[in-house]
Amino acid sequence: MADAARALALAGALASACGGDDAIANDDDTGTAADDDGSETTADDAPASSDDADSSSDASVDDSTGATTGATTGIGPAACGDGERQGLEQCDDANDTPGDGCEPGCLLPSGEPVWTEIVDAEGGNDVANAVAVAGNGDIVVVGGQTIGGAQDVWVARWDAGGEPLSSMVVDYGEGGDDVANGVAILDDGALAIVGMREQPSDTMLDDAIVLVLEPGGDERWSVIVDDGMSDRANAVAVGEGGIAVAGVREGATTDDDAWFAVYDPQGAEVWSQIEMGPGDVDDVAHGIAWTPDGGLIVAGERGTNATRDIWISGRDGNGDELWTVLEDFEFGADFAADVVMVDRTAWVTGMISSPLTNSEEIWIASYGLDGTKADMTTWNSPGFVVDSGAGIAVDGDDVFVAGESAVADEQRNVFVGRFGAGMPAPVWHDTVDGGAGLQDSGTAIALLPDGSVVATGVLTVLGEGTNAWIRRYAP
């Protein structure tokens, strides 16, 4: 499918920031503690906003991408204190006065939004499902964009300052719906992307997609995985062992089975494994990560006859099982949504159903390479509501999670939070409500070189379907 990577590379418009105290916090209307889009940031260790912050909108809309673009400078040499926000600077108010909302070193208070993008292509369903950060700080987001009535794989790039660099769509379904669920960046700058497409012959069934795009956007290779029923790829990780993929393959006589595989740099399958639980409930591999010794950690859910349990499995370089951990909190469905490796520790997030709070909670845990649990915490927002983790990033003792948090009369909102290792409550957290009590969710999170994080998600907006949401936070 070499011609499937036809795409419109859409360059983003650039705008310059103004100097002085008016260019402190954000480049659009998301810079205060309670934003116009319904988000609220709470920080236990820093003020949520500053009197110096400019909360008026300097944003404009690029008609080619539907993206809201802010007034910032691009990547370049940063001179903190010159009144112009550049490079990885989060603010620059031309002074070094602490406590004024732009701290010495051109830092915002931890957890303060630096910039936000909301992408609505044509009023249909647009989603941001995964994010990866390049070595130069560029932010790559993948998901789906609805163009002409059908959803296509969407790949977009911003610089660290929030300036849009490119946007493209790829149609793998020959008119059906396609979506990207995971992305990883190869050493040469190419993008490994996974997702699913509707089968052209039967739109009730899906095929898994694994593809690599050149740094310029052309297709290097792609693989369609079709077992005859519905298959999808949820996550991807790159390492010396190749391109590892996690997802689901549905058997002709079974429900969904957890699937994980490795492909070589040319797109040939090295090996593939299927795992199924003892019951008739679906089994899913949601996340995958390479270990330092060339093995893999796979995270997801294992079905039993009654419900679903958290499933985490250590594998060798051939995919063979070394150990497996099942976590059952004996109240309802539990699952692991994402896993990352930090040194020799696997960090995992997801959701548990707690009998103590009678509700679903964000779950965070870490495991050694032998499967020994090192750390665990859960968090539940006030009230009997649903909270869950979807993406995780770790920087030293800081654990960042993107997911969902429910509020009475608002259904589910985007959740982004920073936890300390083992801490039961976040140091700061941000929730975003698309409005009108509709369902929103955080999907992924990644670290930037300066220790800040960028999160992705989906907002449901009346009259616009779903919009892709991207926000960078101060470290």
Image (cartoon, grey):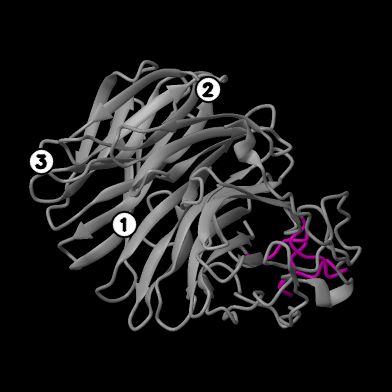
Residue in the picture at 54% in, 33% down: 211
Name the residue type under label 2: Gly
Q: Position of residue 337 (x, y in %)?
A: 36, 47
Front in this rendered view, residue 268 or 413: 268
Q: What SS does tag 1 mark? A: strand
Any magenta on residue 363? no
Q: Position of residue 60 (x, y in %)?
A: 76, 73
Q: Are marks 2 and 3 in contact (CB under 8 Å)?
A: no
Assess disc 3: are there few (<14), some (14-19) or many (≥20) residues with their C-alpha within 10 Å of its C-alpha: some
Front in this rendered view, residue 207 or 259: 207
Residue 24's place in the image compared with 226, above or below, is below
Assess disc 2: are there few (<14), some (14-19) or many (≥20) residues with their C-alpha within 10 Å of its C-alpha: some
Name the residue type under label 3: Gly
Tag of residue 378 = 1
Residue in the picture at 77% in, 71% down: 24
93 relative position to 227: left or right: right
Q: Magenta residues?
A: 89-109
Residue at which label 2 appears: 267
Front in this rendered view, residue 201 or 155: 201
Q: Position of residue 146 (x, y in %)?
A: 54, 60
Name the residue type under label 1: Thr
